[in-house]
Image: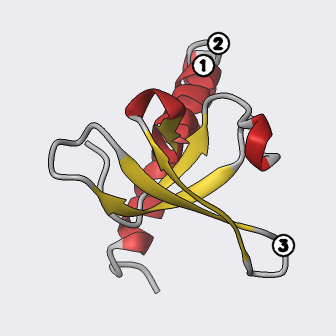
Amino acid sequence: MLKDLDVVVLTHDIQEQGLKKGLKGAIVHCYDDAQAFEVEFVGDTGETQALLTLEPADIQLERDIIRGQVVAILDVLPADLLAEVRDFSEFLQFQHLGKVG
């Protein structure tokens, strides 16, 4: 479920605005029916490049894209390397939760 401040990625070009597929933006408002979202795209200088009302088909949660990429990598790793990835992931989780360092 998409929510305010989620980082999203465009699923297609929006030529009228000069925005390319894969561009990252942030949801700044979710409409109550979850059928549209206000998404802000910021340029390299920090200025708003575009603020658009987009539908769910126009955007994908960045986290979901990353998750898919990681799963694709994991699917081809041998068991010993997969275990190393698990161990490192657990380390990162503990670090994120403030239990390390």
> Are circles 2 and 1 on residues that touch, CB within 8 Å?
yes
Residue 16: quarter of image: top right
Residues packed near mark 2 inside 10 Å, few (<14), some (14 to 19) or many (20 plus): few
Please say if 78 is above or below 25: above
Judged by depth in the image, the label closer to the viewer, 3 or 2, is 3
Q: Is residue 83 something one can see in this rendering? A: no
Along the line of sight, the residue nearer the viewer: 74 or 24: 24
Mark positioned earlier in the residue sequence (1 or 3): 3
Query: Disc number at residue 83?
Result: none
Numbered marks: total: 3
Query: Disc number at residue 72?
Result: 1
Residues packed near mark 1 inside 10 Å, few (<14), some (14 to 19) or many (20 plus): few
Of all residues, the one furthest to the bottom in this rendering is: 101
Identify the residue at horizontal 24%, vertical 53% (top origin): 31
The residue carrying mark 2 is 76
Along the line of sight, the residue nearer the viewer: 16 or 77: 16
Identify the residue at horizontal 58%, vertical 32% (top origin): 70
Identify the residue at horizontal 65%, vertical 52% (top origin): 24
Alpha-carbon distance for marks 1 and 3?
30 Å
Q: Does 37 sit left or right of 81 as displayed?
A: left
Q: Disc 2 on helix, strand or loop?
A: loop
Mark positioned earlier in the residue sequence (3 or 2): 3
User: What amino acid is labelled 2 in the image?
Assistant: Val
Alpha-carbon distance for marks 3 and 2?
36 Å
The residue carrying mark 3 is 44
User: What amino acid is labelled 3 in the image?
Assistant: Asp
Alpha-carbon distance for marks 2 and 1?
7 Å
Judged by depth in the image, the label closer to the viewer, 1 or 3, is 3
